[in-house]
Amino acid sequence: MTDLPSPVDRLARSREHLRAALRQASGIGAEESDPPSNEQDSAWRQGLHSLPGGEAVAEAVGAWWAKHPMRIAVEVLAEALQSLLRPVAQRHPVGLVLGAMLTGALLAWGRPWRWILTPTLLATLLPQLFAKVTAKVTSAGWLSVLATVASLAARQTSAPPSSPRTDPRNSPSHRPPTAP
């Protein structure tokens, strides 16, 4: 006879595929250090990790974002917008640029950062971020930060004082002639 799967087997397989897709979307079972999506992102991450304490900040923000309830919605929205805008960009690139300019103008006019980044939001977010960063930084990391700050302070104190700037209008060659 035929070796077609039974409806129960097909249902079980479908459910397993859905579970795997949901696990992947929520980040469960995925590695936390996913490879960067492009070279610019990689350079940006390397620059952040090269800063003293930057790696701990990046890990804390990444852990916060991985648990954030809006992460999945943002990722789905980004994928939907990309699949929607890719054909538009191929057919009408000038229209897409004009739409981007209009969106930028609306953002500049509306200034959403003024009403999104309220003091209340910062007062609730910054202590959590600070606690996660300080918990992740080892004593060697703190010593590295202190050494960097100390070397910067030492360089600033040992630098020769810069010559005072003079106004070129006050120099003898630029003075207006005086009346006799």
Image: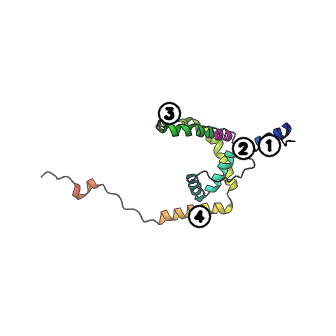
Image x and y of residue 153, in percent: 52, 62
Circle 2: element type: helix
- In this rendering, the count of numbered labels is 4
Residue occupied by mark 3 = 106
Residue occupied by mark 2 = 26
Q: How far apart are marks 2 and 3 (CA)?
A: 32 Å
Circle 1: element type: helix
User: Which of the two marks, 2 or 3, is nearer to us in this view?
Assistant: 2
* Along the viewing direction, whichever of 102 and 60 lies nearer the viewer: 102
Q: Distance between the residues labelled 1 and 4?
A: 52 Å
Going from N to C along the chain, the mark reached first, 2 or 1, is 1
Residue occupied by mark 4 = 147
**In terms of image quadrants, where is residue 134?**
bottom right
Task: Name the kind of residue labelled 3 in the image.
Answer: Leu
* Along the viewing direction, whichever of 144 and 41 lies nearer the viewer: 41
Residue furthest toward the left? 180
Q: Do the residues labelled 1 and 4 touch (CB within 8 Å)?
A: no
User: Where are the magenta residues, as a range?
Assistant: 68-76
